[in-house]
Amino acid sequence: MSEPIETHAVDVLVIGAGGAGLRAAIAAHDAGARVGLVCKSLLGKAHTVMAEGGMAAALGHVAPDDSWQVHFRDTMVGGKLLNNPRMAELHAKEAPERVRELESWGAVFDRTTDGRILQRPFGGHSHPRLAHVGDRTGLEMIRTLQDRAVSLGIDVFMECTVTRLISGAHGICGAYGYWRTTGRPVVFSAKAVVLATGGIGRAYSVTSNSWEYSGDGHALAYDAGAELIDMEFVQFHPTGMVWPPGVRGLLVTEAVRGEGGILRNRDGRRFMWDYLPEDRRGEYAATDEEAERWVRAASRSQPTDARRPPELSTRDNVSRAIYQEVRDGRGSPHGGVFLDISYLPADHVRQKLPSMYDQFKELADVDITKGPMEVGPTTHYVMGGIRVDAETGATTVAGLFAAGECAGGMHGGNRLGGNSLSDLLVFGARTGAGAAAHAAGFPGTPYLDPVQLRVAERELGEPLERLDGEDAYAIQRDLQETMQTLVGIYRTEADLTEAIARLADLRARWLAVRAPNGRAYNPGWNLVFDMRNLITVSEAISRSARQRQESRGAHSRVDYPDLDDRAWGGVNSVVHRASDGTMEVGTSPLVSMREELRALLGGAH
């Protein structure tokens, strides 16, 4: 007789312990729910700590003219108007309150001379708007939220991977997973489940993302019947390290450019002047002198009449510019470009960018106060994700909620830097409360279907039992090479079609994957389930990218280089699982925008 499976019963199960998951768990607890928080790694090891530059909120501490209305407009324009306007509105209105709340819980921010939270400029933002802690803002956020959650007594289940969601008569009612250290299965009974698992960056070979970012939430939701939207929009951060090879892709925060960093090609030319969108050139400095005047004012936390430097264009635009410079033979020795902030006082650089100073000194033997960094684009963020309700974070499947990077809609076609951290706070709080409200109305006790549990257990054990088969590491290598070369910054119909064919082959290979050496401490076995999820999200990205025959935001088609508002400006891409198990891709109309919000956009497009 087999041993009974370890089972834990909660009201709300939150899967993912980054900023969104922690904030959702706190909100659900505060609403009276029994909360379980599952994290794939150790508590505090969330990828949120890699978000360095700051959290965007219209506090108005440096720029008194800033407001939620301006923040809303910047977010919608940056997202090429594909954003869910209600999400963008709620985010802009509630971000200041969430930042102040974080401060009240013990977060320590950099300060203005009169003691208020300091704010720095970032690409795409009209005003200095990012509340920050040097270049370690994400770390401070996680520290604060983690301390809050632990002090509330929220149950935390560390080093646990969830492989399947369990459904019942009233929707999602639990989750099946295993302990990564022992391999033993574990089941969670829950009246509501929140997915807060982050992004998909490990689908690519060059990425700023940590190993946990394997699209788990996207794939779990898709398999459970939820819709994914706008998966073609993958953000390539303009500045990742390019040398040495062992750290290729490691993030170089946008705060470097926000503090005045200049991008130059191998000839020493400041090339971003050449790549500013014609309809937005008026927002950027026209000369080096004007840009320098802006930097001097920003370094003193003072407003200025000078326009912002060209390096603070949106991330999609800067990434394409760097890619073009390298492709045209004007790149740095290791295939990037130069980012230089050494013209500013050394003490100022070390004070404002301590992590970047240490990172380059230790990993590349470069002193950024004395010379330039080499940087290039790196896979960073996915704007697409699980379709959610703006008010509550509810997905299209009852009992299932999502927040943070795995949720779609907030950022449209391109995310502005700093909007991610405030997104985690605003929609983490809303989603946790929404899940708790759903749990409170759940009739009776969740019933965990034994048939579904047996299927999940069989999936877990099959790779261990095969005597021969595919190697998960070989599948990972081929998947990342496929996505990096065929579904990168620039895309074509032929490349995307080839990628989809390769992904079908990878899925067939995955069905025969083998992971010998038992369950305990078996990284190859852990990788099996990461690969399943990454193949799913990679197919969603590729099929959505092939469908959208235009270039918009972070999605650039060489064969369709122009924006096509008539055909594509009014729709989101939608991915769902068909009844036969195949992936279907279509479109749905954008969420309607109230007239008073539309008026804030003026003639923006």
Image (cartoon, rainbow, N blue to C red):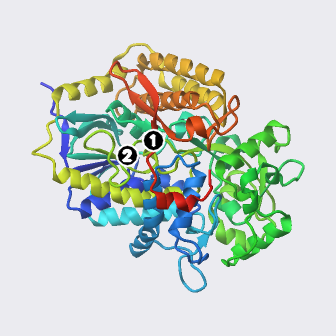
Q: Look at the picture and state if 525 lies above or below 281.
A: above
Q: Look at the picture and state if 67 lies above or below 596.
A: below
Residue topped by disc 1: 385
Image location (x, y in percent) of residue 82? 53, 46
Residue occupying the far bottom of the picture: 114
- Nearest-to-viewer mark from 2 and 1: 2
Total number of numbered discs in the rendering = 2
- Mark 1: amino acid: Gly
Image location (x, y in percent) of residue 76? 55, 54
- Measuring 40% from the left and 42% from the top, which residue is drawn there? 387
- Measuring 39% from the left and 25% from the top, which residue is drawn there? 517
Image location (x, y in percent) of residue 391? 35, 55
Taking depth in this image into account, of 436 and 89 the one nearest to the observer is 89
Q: Which mark is residue 388?
A: 2
Q: CA distance from mark 2 to mark 1?
A: 9 Å
| Side of 235 relative to 391 (left or right) | right
Image location (x, y in percent) of residue 240? 67, 48
Q: Which mark is residue 370?
A: none
Badge 1 marks a residue whose secondary structure is strand
Badge 2 marks a residue whose secondary structure is loop
Residue occupying the far left of the picture: 444
| Side of 437 relative to 108 (left or right) | left
Asked where in the image residue 594 lies, by quadrant, the reply is bottom left
- Measuring 23% from the left and 62% from the top, which residue is drawn there? 31
